Amino acid sequence: MKMADLIEVNYHLLAVLTRFGIEGGFGEKTVRDICEKNHLDTDTFLLICNVYTHKDHEPSEEILRDGHIDDILRYLHQSHDYYMSNALVLLASTIEELIKPCSDTQKKVIWQFFAEYKAELEKHFAYEEGEVIPYVQKLLLGKRDPHYSIDRFEENHSNIEEKLSDLKNLILKSLPATCDDRLRVRLLNYIFALQSDLDSHTAIEDNILVPMVRLIENPLSHVRTEKQNAVAGEERDDLSDREIEILVSVAQGLLNKEIADRHNISINTVITHRKNITRKTGIKTVAGLTVYAILNGYVDINSVK
C-alpha cells in the first residue's frame, strides 16, 4: 500500500508519522519503503496505525511476538514530548485568550483546573519515562529487575483522560456567554482531538506494550485479550462472587496490592478482575464503582472512605 493512500484512509495517522520523524513528500512510495528509510519495522508501524484506526483493536499473540518493542517505546517517548511541548502549550494559549472577558474568580478556577491537569499528565509521563521505559530497555538486553514487573506499571496506570473530559465540559457548558464563541469552538476542537489521541496512546500501552513485555518476561506465557476473556470466561453481564469481593475492596479504598493480599491472589489476577468488572458495569473510575457498589447493596456507605 502507498503511504499517501494510508493517510487518505485515516488522516489522524499524520500524528503517528510526525512522532516517528517521518517527513512528507511520499510520492508513490509504499508504507514499507517509508518505514525502511526511517529504520522502522513495518509491521509494528501498521500495528500502531491499526490502534489509531480501529477502536478496541487487540492484536493476536503472534503479531505481538513478532513486533519490535523498541519501536513502540520510541513512539511513546515522542508522544510524551508532543503532549507536553505542543498540545498543552496550544491549549494554554487558547484558554488564556478565551477567558479574557471572565471575572478574576472565573479565570482563577479555570487556570487552577488546567494546571492540575497538566501536573497530573507530567506525573504520569514522568513515571513512564523514569520507570517503565528504562525497565523495558534493560529487559531487552537480558537484564531482568527482580523488584519490578510490567504488572506494577499496569497497577499504577492512571487514567489521563478524565480530567480533560471535565475541562471540555466546563468550557462547553459553564463559561459565560461573553466569551468569544469562535475561540470556544476552536478550543473544544483541540480538546476533542487531544482526548482522541490520548485514548489511542492508552490503548497502545494497554493492548500492545503491556502484553509484549509480559511475553518477554515469561516467554512461555500466552496472551489472552479482553474479547477472548469475555468469550472463554463469563458471557453473563452479572458480576461473579469473586468480582463482587474485588469490587467491595475497591470501594473501600484498597490498592491492587492490598486487594491481592486480602484475597490471597496475584496482582495480575486483581487487574483481570477489575477489567472484567469495568467491562460488565461500563464504569471505569473508582468513584463510579464505589457509587455502583453502594447502590447495589454490596457495601454500606459508612464503610467507604
Image (cartoon, helix red, strand yellow):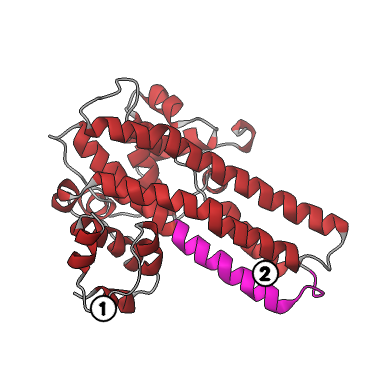
Q: Quadrant of residue 152?
A: top left
Please provide percent x and percent y for residue 59. 22, 55
The front one of 68 and 152 is 68
* Disc number for residue 27: 1
| Labels 1 and 2 touching (C-beta < 8 A) | no
Closer to the chain start, of discs 1 and 2, is 1
Disc 1/disc 2 C-alpha distance (Å): 41 Å
Which residue occupies 26% across, 78% down?
Answer: 27
Residue 34 vs 130, above or below: the answer is below
**Which secondary structure lies at badge 1?**
loop
- In the image, residue 280 lies in the stretch drawn in magenta: no
Which residue occupies 61% across, 57% down?
Answer: 89
- In the image, residue 179 lies in the stretch drawn in magenta: yes
* Disc number for residue 172: 2
Q: Which residues are magenta?
A: 176-198
**Which secondary structure lies at badge 2?**
helix
